[in-house]
Image (cartoon, rainbow, N blue to C red):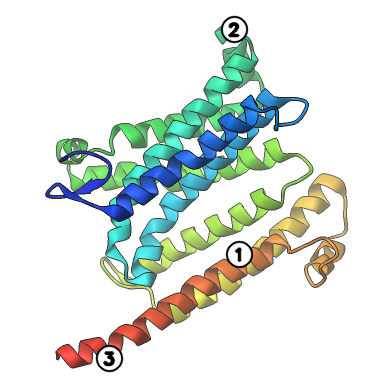
Amino acid sequence: MTGWPWTEPPGRFSPFKLAVFIALFIPGVWTAISFALGMLGPRPLTEAIHQVGLWTIRFFFVSLAITPARQILQWPELLLVRRMIGVAAFTYAVVHISLYAIDEKLMLLVVGSEIVRRIYLTIGFTALIGLAVLAATSTDGMVRRLGSRRWRKLHGIVYGIGVLAVIHMFMQSKADVQEATWMAGVLAWLLGFRALGRLRGRGGRVPLRWTAMLSVAAAIATALGEAGYFWWKMGVAPTRVLAVNFSLVAGIRPGWIVLFVGLALSAAGVLIAVWRRPARRAIA
């Protein structure tokens, strides 16, 4: 069993890793079934490309969130699935561009010219190359070959890939940019958490009160970014967009989603810390 995705060193079976491994297949299988049953609308292949692309970015952001979630929730086992989720994001990205090539009748010269000619495709393809580099160097053997320091430096491009993914998502989403907006807010939170971690020094934990304040700041930045986007793209007054955040007429806005996710994670961290404190005292 050693080396299988559902095992952990030194080859023990891990129900947690198996559950995550199975879960990573669910969106792709569901998209395939929906395509086969004609449930993807009048342009099923285009919708399949869109759905697989969305899950590429979602899985990628989940992999980015592993490190802060591990620290805040005091759940070191999360690191066991970070590589798996990152490789899944790359796999979905490959399927995404493969479906696009199929939509273009496998005319690879046309696909290549479209990638060069259309900026949003250029950005998406650049992100794919970055994911390929990360996937190719994700093995233990590559970590040893590159050395820990060089490996960490190389994998620092992950946040640049995140920026490219969000830009690609915005350009691809056109009018409906709600998910792209809150994804941008989540990326701002992740970058902020990384900056706070560096401020604390290597190995330093980010205090939970800081993560809560970061969540508020990221939510405000998300709301302002959304207002700025609609002002730049459609000429809508920023005050009108900001006002919508305080009503449910247009649903729950991205800023509130970022705030809820960040504060929920911080609150969970507080509860876990309080719950574990008596256990530590008892051991002492």
Q: Amino acid at mark 3?
A: Pro
Viewer-nearest of discs 3 and 2: 3
Q: Kindly report the distance in space between the C-alpha atoms of the residues bearing marks 1 and 2.
A: 41 Å
Name above or below for residue 1 compared with residue 229. above
Circle 2 residues within 10 Å: few <14, some 14–19, many ≥20:
few
Rendered residue at 55%/28% (across/down): 96
Residue at image mark 1: 258
Circle 3 residues within 10 Å: few <14, some 14–19, many ≥20:
few
- From the top left corner, tell me how far across and down residue 219 is, in percent: 63, 67
Circle 1 residues within 10 Å: few <14, some 14–19, many ≥20:
many
- From the top left corner, tell me how far across and down residue 27 is, in percent: 53, 40
Q: Residue furthest left?
A: 10
Rendered residue at 43%/52% (across/down): 64
Classify mark 2: helix, strand or loop: loop
- Nearest the viewer among 127 and 82 is 82
Which comes before the other along the chain, label 1 or label 3?
1
The image quadrant of residue 272 is bottom left
Residue at image mark 2: 107
Which comes before the other along the chain, label 1 or label 2?
2
Split into 4 quadrants, where in the image is the C terminus?
bottom left
Q: Kindly report the distance in space between the C-alpha atoms of the residues bearing marks 3 and 2.
A: 64 Å
Viewer-nearest of discs 1 and 3: 3
Q: Amino acid at mark 2?
A: Met
Residue at image mark 3: 278
Q: Does residue 120 appear anywhere in the picture?
A: no
Which comes before the other along the chain, label 3 or label 2?
2
